[in-house]
Image (tube, grey):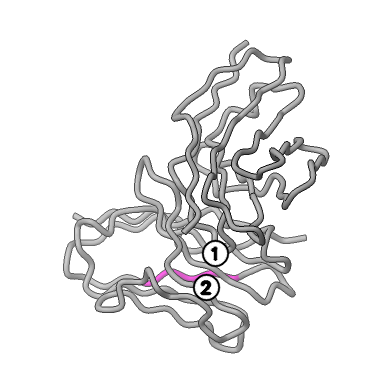
C-alpha cells in the first residue's frame, strides 16, 4: 500500500514569510497527525484530526500556525509569519488504529 | 501526566540481543506502553505496544514489569539496520521524549 505522502520535502524561507505543507494520508486512515521535530529532540504533536474534526491542538501555536483537513483526507499545515525557531522537520502521520501511526518522510523547513 | 525515562544512548554488538529499558513509574492503569523507533532522516516507525502482558511480534518483544512501572524492549538479534533512536511512550496522545540512541556495532 502507498505510504503517507508529504510535500515539499525541503523548504527555505525568510523569517516573517508564510509557508504551507501538504499531507496525503494512507487511504482509509481516519486519524491524521502533524508533528514538529526540532533537531535533537523527539517529535512534538501539533495537532490531531479525526476525519475532518480536531481532536487535540493543545500544543499548536495558534497565533501563527493553522491546519485544516477538508473532506477528511488531505491536510495542510500553515505557518504565518514564520520565526527562526520554526526551523524543524514537520512530520505528518496517519493511523487506522491509534497505537500504530504511519509517518511520512517529513518536510525540512529552514527559516533564515 | 505519565512520563518516561530512558537512557540517552546504548551500544550493542551485532547479532546480540539489545535490551532497551524504560521507566514509567507514574503510568495509569489504563495507559498502554508504546515503542517507536526513528532511523536517521526518516519518520518514526511503530514497533510494538502492550498494557500488562508481555508482547512479541516479528520485530521485537516487550516485557512489562508486574507493577507496570517499567518495561524493556528486546531486539533479539540486533543488526546494523537497527541503529536508531528508540522512543518509549505511555500516553495515548503520543508525547515523544528524547528517546534512546541505540548504536549497533559490527
Is residue B67 left or right of B85 when viewed as pictured?
Answer: right
Residue occupying the point 82% across, 38% down: B58
Chain of the residue under the numbered disc 2 shown in the image:
A
Query: Percent position (x, y) of residue B75?
Result: 71, 28
Residue A6 to residue A20: above or below: above
Q: Which residues are the magenta region?
A: A20-24
Query: Percent position (x, y) of residue A90?
Result: 43, 59
Within 10 angstroms of label 1, few (less than 14), some, or many (20 or more) residues?
Answer: few
Secondary structure under tag 2 reads strand
Within 10 angstroms of label 2, few (less than 14), some, or many (20 or more) residues?
Answer: many
Q: Which mark is residue B93?
A: 1
Residue occupying the point 73% across, 38% down: B62
Residue occupying the point 36% across, 74% down: A78
- Residue closest to the eye, B57 or A71: B57
- Residue closest to the eye, B38 or A19: B38
Q: Which mark is residue A48?
A: 2
Verify CB contact (< 8 Å) between mark 1 and mark 2.
yes
Amino acid at each position: 500500500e502507498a505510504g503517507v505522502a508529504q510535500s515539499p520535502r525541503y523548504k527555505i524561507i525568510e523569517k516573517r514569510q508564510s509557508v504551507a505543507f501538504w499531507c496525503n494520508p494512507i487511504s482509509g486512515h481516519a486519524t491524521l497527525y502533524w508533528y514538529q521535530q526540532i533537531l535533537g529532540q523527539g517529535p512534538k504533536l501539533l495537532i490531531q484530526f479525526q476525519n475532518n474534526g480536531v481532536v487535540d491542538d493543545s500544543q499548536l501555536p495558534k497565533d501563527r500556525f493553522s491546519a485544516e483537513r477538508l473532506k477528511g483526507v488531505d491536510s495542510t499545515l500553515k505557518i504565518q509569519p514564520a520565526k527562526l525557531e520554526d526551523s524543524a522537520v514537520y512530520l505528518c502521520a496517519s493511523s487506522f488504529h491509534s497505537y500504530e501511526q504511519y509517518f511520512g518522510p517529513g518536510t525540512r523547513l529552514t527559516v533564515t | 501526566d505519565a512520563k518516561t525515562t530512558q537512557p540517552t544512548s546504548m551500544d550493542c554488538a551485532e547479532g546480540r540481543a539489545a535490551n532497551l529499558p524504560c521507566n514509567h513509574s507514574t503510568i495509569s492503569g489504563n495507559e498502554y506502553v508504546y515503542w517507536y523507533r526513528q532511523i536517521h532522516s526518516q519518520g518514526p516507525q511503530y514497533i510494538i505496544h502492550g498494557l500488562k502482558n508481555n508482547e512479541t511480534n516479528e520485530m521485537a518483544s516487550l516485557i512489562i514489569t508486574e507493577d507496570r512501572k517499567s518495561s524493556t524492549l528486546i531486539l533479539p538479534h540486533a543488526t546494523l539496520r537497527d541503529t536508531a533512536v528508540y522512543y518509549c511512550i505511555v500516553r495515548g496522545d503520543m508525547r515523544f521524549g528524547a528517546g534512546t540512541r541505540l548504536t549497533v556495532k559490527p
